[in-house]
Structures are given as C-alpha cells and as structure tokens.
Amino acid sequence: MRITCPYCGQRDLAEFAYGGDATQPRPDEADLDAERWAQYVFSRKNPRGWHQEYWQHLHGCRAWLQVTRNTATHEIAEVGLPHGQ
Amino acid sequence: MTTLDPIMRYSAFNLFKQGLRGHRGWPLAWRAPTPAKHYDVIIIGGGGHGLATAYYLAKNHRVGRIAVLEKGWIGGGNTGRNTTIVRSNYMIGSNVDFYEWSMKLWEGLSQDLNFNVMLSQRGQFNLVHSDAQVDAARRRGNVMRAHGIDAELLDAQAVQEALPQLDYRDSARFPIYGALYQGRAGTARHDAVAWGYARAADRLGVDIIQNCEVSGFEFSGERVVGVKTNLGTIGAGRVGVAVAGNSGRLAQMAGFELPIESHILQAFVSESIKPCLDHVVGFGAAHFYISQSDKGGLVFGGDLDGYNSYAQRGNMPILRDVISSAVALMPQVSRLRLLRHWGGVMDMTMDGSPIIGPTPVDGLFLNGGWCYGGFKATPASGWCFAHSLANGGHHPLATDFTLERFEKGLTLDEKGMGPRPWAH
Ligand SMILES: Cc1cc2nc3c(=O)[nH]c(=O)nc-3n(C[C@H](O)[C@H](O)[C@H](O)COP(=O)(O)OP(=O)(O)OC[C@H]3O[C@@H](n4cnc5c(N)ncnc54)[C@H](O)[C@@H]3O)c2cc1C
Ligand SMILES: [Zn+2]
C-alpha cells in the first residue's frame, strides 16, 4: 500500500501511522450521555468496502490525513485533510 | 441426504484391520447433508469455535436438531491460518479461569474426540528484557499461580540452559533478563481441531453444511427465526454467530453495530530445517512469537498490519518488522529462506477480550472478538457458547465477556491499550 500525502506525494505505507475510523461524530464536551460517548468510543460500522479513516504521515510531514480506502482490496480512492479542512 | 456407515473409531486395532485392506474401508469422517427446513439451533461459521459449539451443544445439552453453516470449507478461516499457540497466562477477570478451563479441555481433547489434535505441551517462554518487565512477569505469574495455573519466573541463566540458541551476547539489541515460563503451554494441530470437532459433532447428529453462506436473517417481529443462505432460507429456534473477522458483517445484517474492527494478522513459515527449537518462545521487546513445526519449518508471527482490512493478505512493512524481531532474537535465522506467508482477518475488540453471549436481537447470540488469540480458546469458547445457546445468558466462566461491558466501563484490557483495536 502507498498513500499519496497532499504535501509530500506518494509514500510507502511504512511512513504512516493509522488513526482509525473517521466517521463516528464526537459528542459535545458538555454532553453527559453515557450511551452517546460509548457509541463514539467503542462502536464501529467496520464495513467490508469503502472506509473513511485517519492516517498520520508520522515519518514525513506529520500531518493528519483523512483517507477513503477499500478494506476488501486496499485500494485508495481519496486522500484529504480531516473534516474537509 | 447421504448416509454413511457408522463412523469407525480410530484405534490401533482398526488401523491394523484397515491396513490389511489397503486403507480403502475407512468411512468418511462426516456426512455432507442437504439442509433441513428447520433446526433448533443454527451456528453460522464452521471454524473451530462453531464446530466446538455444535459438539458441546449436542454432548452437554438437549436442544434438538443442530446445524453448522460454513460459507467455504470447515477450518478454512482463522482456524486453518493461525500459529497454533495454546496457553493460559491471562490475568484479568473472566480471562484467567476461562483460558485455564480451555487448557484443561485441550489436555483431554484427543481422547474426548477420538481424534489426535496433536497437542504438544512443549512449554512457552515469554522473555523479559528489563527490570520493569521482570516485575510485570512476576505479577502475572503470581496471578496465575493464585488461580492454580502453572507459571515459573526464570532468570537469564535458566533461560539460556533451555534455549541456548538465542542471542545472549552483551551486544544483543535487547538483552534477555529472564522469562515467565508456562510448562503446560504449547501448540496443537490447527486442522485436526476443526476436523476432530466436526467428526465428533457429526457423530452426535449435527448437520455440517459447507458451501452455505448466510446473507441475511429472517425475523418474526423482533426475533430472529431463521437465516437466508445460497441454499435457501433455513428456519431456526436460536442462531449463534461464530464467524471471527466477519462478525461485523453479520451484525450489520441483523441491524446493530459491534465494538469490533476487522484487521489482518500475518503468519510466516521458513523452509524446513532440523530440530532446533523445542519450545514456544515469545519475545518481550517487540510483539513476536516463534515455534518449530513437526515438519521442521519455523512458524512465527508478530503484530497486526494495523489498519482495518477484510483482505486475507497483508503488506510488506510488517514482514520486515517481524523478520527483524526474529533476527534480533535468533541471529542465525537470517540465513533461512521464507517458505510461505499468509494473512487472516481478525475480529479485534476495543479491549482485546472476547464476547460470548446474547446480542441486542432476540434469538441471536454472538461468539466473537477473539483477536489474534482465539485458537487456544477454541474448546472453552465452544463449551461456554453452547451454554448460552441452550440456556440464554452467560456461562459462569464467561460472565465478563458481555457486549454491554463497553458502555458500562467494565472493559477487560489485558494490554492496557485503550479503545484502539489495532494496538491490542
Ligand atoms: C496469522 C494468525 C495467527 C494466529 N495465531 C494464533 C495463536 O498462535 N494462538 C491462538 O490462540 N490464536 C491465534 N490466532 C487466532 C485464531 O486463529 C482465531 O481466533 C480462531 O481460530 C478463530 O476461530 P473461529 O472459529 O472463531 O474463526 P474461523 O476459523 O475464522 O471460522 C469462522 C468461519 O466462519 C465462516 N463464515 C464467515 N462468514 C460467513 C457467512 N456469512 N456464512 C457462513 N459462514 C461464514 C468463515 O468462512 C470461517 O470458516 C491467529 C490468527 C491468525 C490469522
Ligand atoms: Zn506528508
């Protein structure tokens, strides 16, 4: 697998660290509902197919990225910045 | 439905008798039945866990007709892909006694199933490489001993006597301080576990249906009453899911989410060499474990690839990582050639511990979240899951393995990694 960092270009997987699922919305800090927090922290759609996920270009520019990757084929469709920044 | 001769016991006498006839008289080890319209219990997934569940359900409980539905061939999932290490060195909650019960079942399994699962209790050394790791090993060993499980803390000299082939030079990248040793740990033959349980379950009347993929559930109101498959719809009183890395997909079909992510774990086998490693060895400076198979290949593995995946193959960085651990521990292996490597899809939970019991959907039960350590759990997992399917609720040995433990803050995080399943 190679990931094309928007700053550094196409780089080997070994330069990146995984940050996990990017789809669970983080509850508001003031939200005290345990169920919503449990959903955010623990619950996963875990799809076989396209997956929105975070990666950090750890051994490169260190930017956090949001990647659209297929979990069945490892194909990467899109690399951008988190939350469409 | 194919009918077969009553299955012949595997014994020295029958081996001799069949030998006289050129071994042409052995009956098939299990039938290949066409599915009935309805079963009292359907188990989805014909890996070790599904087959063990069916066996203990038929043996220990009275529930009527039982079927195991397997989308491919039995034992073709993680059961047939793992590095076969069997141990019971856990220290949190249900893990401790559950894995020890599994070890006890392993110790009698070949006799119980009348099938040689080739359990080899060659002992496992978990190496430690710093004073802090010595303390952690002592603590783990004490927890184990307090639960009646064998554990010994060995110093570097004792380790060197048993394992002279490791790197003990002062220049070693990670000097060996000692090891936590479990003498009853070892390995078992993975395929034999699937085949032995299948044959024994079949003998008790369980229908094992291969090439039967479940693609959805049938509901009556809120309750699951059957499964949709490529061989048609099959009705069920209760349904148990034991599909390892595919747990999330089955949960999605039933309409809920799990605290599980699917990740790849790779395993590696070297070319065959003469016996050089009598034990299982776990490296403490990185995640790495190694043993030698009966064929002579060194069988080893390490960390997950570390990103969500359903592909049964991994990438190169982990290969490099695992091989560097191998060479740091046993420098002489640098001259070996790698024969094969492959991957399996792991059901990684958010705390690294499993789930066995009811789900939010009535009539549907889950056995999953085995991470990369579920082979050793196979007997106890089947034992406890059979209890859940027969009686509802949880087996007393599995009371902590609930789905609700996450929202209740009762996670069982042996490694202390937090909710990052790729780090467990
Ligand atoms: C490389 C590697 C090394 C490992 N090393 C060890 C080790 O040393 N020690 C240890 O204890 N554990 C180890 N494990 C973990 C262990 O292999 C697993 O936890 C255990 O074998 C899981 O057994 P199972 O029966 O739950 O799953 P599986 O054997 O994967 O069985 C699940 C079955 O479900 C079937 N299935 C899936 N979806 C469907 C569907 N929709 N319909 C019908 N059938 C379906 C699959 O085809 C599969 O056969 C390792 C795993 C891997 C991959
Ligand atoms: Zn970059």
Image (cartoon, rainbow, N blue to C red):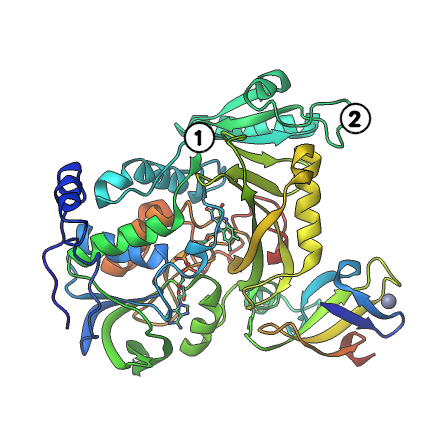
Chain ID of residue with mark 1: B
Answer few, some or many: residues within 10 Å of disc 2's Cα (few below 14, many 20 plus, some between 14 and 19): few
Q: Is residue B158 above or below residue A13?
A: above
Q: Is residue A70 above or below residue B377?
A: below
Image side of residue A13 versus residue B110, left or right: right
What is the count of numbered marks?
A: 2
Answer few, some or many: residues within 10 Å of disc 1's Cα (few below 14, many 20 plus, some between 14 and 19): some
Residue B186 in sight: yes
Image side of residue B176 versus residue B62, left or right: right
In what quadrant of the picture does the N terminus of chain B appear?
bottom left
Residue at image position (45%, 57%) is: B78
**Residue contact between numbered discs 2 and 1, judged by CB atoms under 8 Å:** no
Name which quarter of the figure residue B153 lies in: top right
Name which quarter of the figure residue B251 lies in: bottom left
Ligand 2 falls in quadrant: bottom right
Viewer-side residue, A27 vs A22: A22
For label 2, the residue is B171
Instruction: Look at label 1 and name its amino acid.
Output: Arg
Question: Which label sits on residue A42?
Answer: none
Image side of residue B277 versus residue B66, left or right: right
For label 1, the residue is B122
Residue at image position (44%, 61%) is: B244
Which of the two discs, 2 and 1, labels the residue nearer the N terminus? 1
Q: Where residue B310 appears, x then y in whole percent?
A: 55, 68
Mark 2 residue element:
loop
Q: Is residue B279 above or below residue B28?
A: above
Chain ID of residue with mark 2: B
Name which quarter of the figure residue B150 lies in: top left
Mark 1 residue element:
loop
